[in-house]
Image (cartoon, helix red, strand yellow):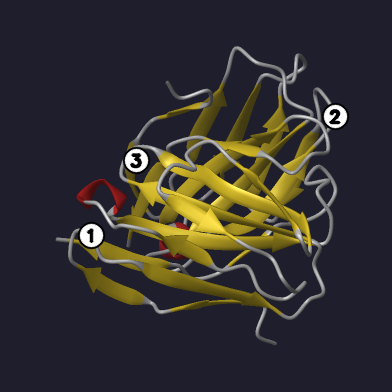
Amino acid sequence: NAGVTQTPKFQVLKTGQSMTLQCAQDMNHEYMSWYRQDPGMGLRLIHYSVGAGITDQGEVPNGYNVSRSTTEDFPLRLLSAAPSQTSVYFCASSLTTDLNNQPQHFGDGTRLSIL
Amino acid sequence: TQLLEQSPQFLSIQEGENLTVYCNSSSVFSSLQWYRQEPGEGPVLLVTVVTGGEVKKLKRLTFQFGDARKDSSLHITAAQPGDTGLYLCAGARGSWGKLQFGAGTQVVVTP
């Protein structure tokens, strides 16, 4: 019963480095999204995807790229890491975009520090 | 600017006491969700309220959606240490998958 799996759990980067945060779900969910969680600010939507081949920007997309080549995977790429991107990143998935009636399942997060 | 304001930010009570967490906004939402998050884990959905004035009960937890669908509250009766966690509210507008989260209320229940 894997659900939403995020890797790595922890990562430390230097300013300017790039990396990819992995997210996979095994529930055949169409809707996937990435959030960042910072103290006192709740979760903010970075990017989301309504299906394979379709992605769109959320509230705070700058500095991040995403792609959705398969239904299962939704990686988040940091192009050139900055200290302001130090955060906890969560991936979530749901059967459809109708979150009024469908539960959203979250992974356990990736804790990212940029030095 | 936080679209959804949660209060209080922090709540520390003793086992057996009651508590209420509030989630307020000037905007109308099609639904409001409540999550609980424990350290090192992702948020877990507790309930979704959809209809204005709706009240849902989940064992000792009571959730209410305001008549105007702009606010919600979470009431815990006879809190237990296992209720400790960060409680997050999130509002949906329409069916397009975007949620607006509040900053959260950290609840600590001591034995």
Q: Name the residue located 37 percent from the left edge and 46 percent from the top edge.
A: B106
Instruction: Locate the C terminus of chain B and report the quarter of the image it occupies.
Output: bottom left
**10 Å crowding of disc 1: few (<14), some (14-19), many (20+):** some
Same subunit, tags 1 and 2: no
- Disc tally is 3
- x and y percent of residue B91 in the render? 66, 34
Q: Which SS class for mark 1? A: loop
User: What amino acid is at disc 2?
Assistant: Thr
Residue with the mark numbered 3:
B11
- Residue type, mark 3 in image: Leu
Identify residue type, mark 1: Gly
* Separation of residues labelled 2 and 3 (CA atoms): 28 Å
Which is more foreground, mark 1 or mark 2? 1
A35 left or right, relative to B60: left
Q: Position of residue A4 (x, y in %)?
A: 62, 74
Q: Which residue is mark 2?
A: B51
- Pick the quarter of the image with the N terminus of chain B: top left
Quarter holding residue B2: top left
Q: CA distance from mark 1 to mark 3?
A: 39 Å
Q: Quadrant of residue A70?
A: bottom right
Per the image, label 3 sits on a secondary structure element best described as: strand
Residue at x-position 82% and y-position 34%? B50
Query: Quick check: can you spot residue B16?
Result: no
Q: Nearer the viewer, residue B22 or A86?
A: A86
- Spatial separation of the CA atoms under disc 1 and disc 2: 47 Å
> Residue B63 location in percent, x, y?
68, 39
Residue B41 appears left or right of A97: left
Residue identifier under label 1: A16
